[in-house]
Structures are given as structure tokens and as C-alpha cells.
Amino acid sequence: MSVIRLRNTHCHIINMMLFLVFTLLLLSDAAASKSIIKSLPGFDGNLPFVLETGYIGVGELEAVQLFYYFIESERSPKDDPLVLWLTGGPGCSALSGIIYEIGPLSFDYAKSSGGGKPVFALNPYSWTKIANIIFVDAPVGTGFSYSTTWEGYHVSDTISAVETYEFLRKVRESVFLNRKIYKLYVKEKEWHRSGFFSN
């Protein structure tokens, strides 16, 4: 292996660890349990939709902690389907799906100038107008998802598919226990390391 490749790998690991430590410090309260987010910096007032975030532990000893954003349908949460949105990459945070693709928020670029905090606007074309959506930071190491062991970061297509399936089973028990949602649609954007799902 070349020195440049080793150096790049080493830098990537260090940057990833710094990012994870910083993120965990910022989100230490959210990491303890699921949280309902009522407001966000850059958005005036309370959010006009239900946003829940949290972690679901998967794998051996639940060492892999997959972070999710659940946004309830703005129309009829009990009647509307659930969409599991898996962002492409691999390695792209699910937040990109919320902000740039199908989620209820987008950046208001006209008001987000000058290097200050970004300003959010509502997305009138959001899929949350007609569906409940759960966005997942997967595979581990993406976005806010992390592992408590180094072994947890060894990911393959098979491992990612197994972890995503386990995530679905567990999120059904914890997030949707009191919600009666019967239809599930899985959407993978571009290439995602979750493999194929079937009935």
C-alpha cells in the first residue's frame, strides 16, 4: 500500500473520529433516548410537523448506533404509508435527503448570506405532505451514526443489509409501537449498502 494512500486513510479516520466526538458532545442528550424536536436554529417559531430523532442499537451488543430522523405525515399519519429513505453514497448523511430532496425543509438561500447560520424554509413539495418518512444515517460512520467498537466500522453489503433489517425491526418496536402504520415503502437513492429487501 502506498504511503499516500495510508496517509489519506489515516487522515480520514482521524477526521471521522473528531467529527464523531464533536457530534456526540453536541448531541449527548439526544443520544440517551429518542427526542421530539420542536424547533431548529434558523427556523422561525415551532416546526409545523412532528420531527423525532434518536438512535437504534444494532449488531452484536448493539455496538452500532444508527441515527434516524422520523417525520410524521402532515396529512394523516395513521392512514399514510411509511417510507424508509436510504440516502445514496454510501456515506451521505440522511440530512441531505431532508434538506435537498424530499424532506419538509430547504435552505432559504436569499436569507442565508453573510456566513451566519443557515435559514430554513418549508418545502411545499415535501413527501411528508402524504407520507410518514424515516431517514437513516447508514451505514455506520455516516452522519450521526457511530459504533462503540472499531469492529463495528467494518462494513460490507451483507453486514449493512443485516443491520438495516435489524434497524427496521427495532424501530417498529420503539418508534411505531403506538402508531398504526401498515404500508412500508423502501427507497434507496442511487447505490446504498443495504442490499435487497423482500417480503
Image (spheres, grey):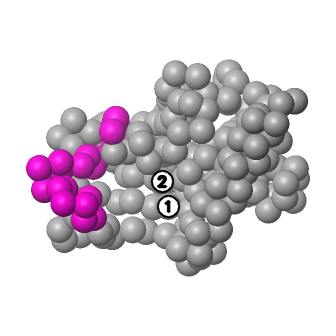
Residue that label 2 marks: 69
Residue 168 image offset from top left, x and y in percent? 65, 43
139 relative to 175 in the view: left or right: right
Q: Looking at the image, which residue is at 34% across and 45% down?
A: 99
Q: Residue furthest left?
A: 110
Residue type indicated by callout 1 = Thr
Residue 81 image offset from top left, x and y in percent? 42, 37
Q: Secondary structure at mark 2?
A: strand
Q: Looking at the image, which residue is at 79% across and 62% down?
A: 148
Q: Are marks 1 and 2 in contact (CB under 8 Å)?
A: yes
Residue 12 seen in this snapshot: yes
Residue 184 image offset from top left, x and y in percent? 52, 33
Q: CA distance from mark 1 to mark 2?
A: 5 Å
170 relative to 67 in the view: left or right: right
Residue 139 image offset from top left, x and y in percent? 67, 41
Residue type indicated by callout 2 = Tyr
Q: Secondary structure at mark 1?
A: strand
Q: How many marks?
A: 2
Residue 174 seen in this snapshot: no
Q: In the image, is residue 45 above or below residue 103?
A: below
Q: Magenta segment, which residues?
A: 100-118
Q: Which mark is residue 53?
A: 1
Q: Which badge, 1 or 2, is on the more N-terminal residue?
A: 1
Q: In the image, is residue 191 above or below residue 119?
A: above
What kind of secondary structure does the magenta stretch mostly adopt? loop
Assess whether residue 133 is covered by the magenta stretch.
no
In which quadrant is the C terminus drawn?
A: top right
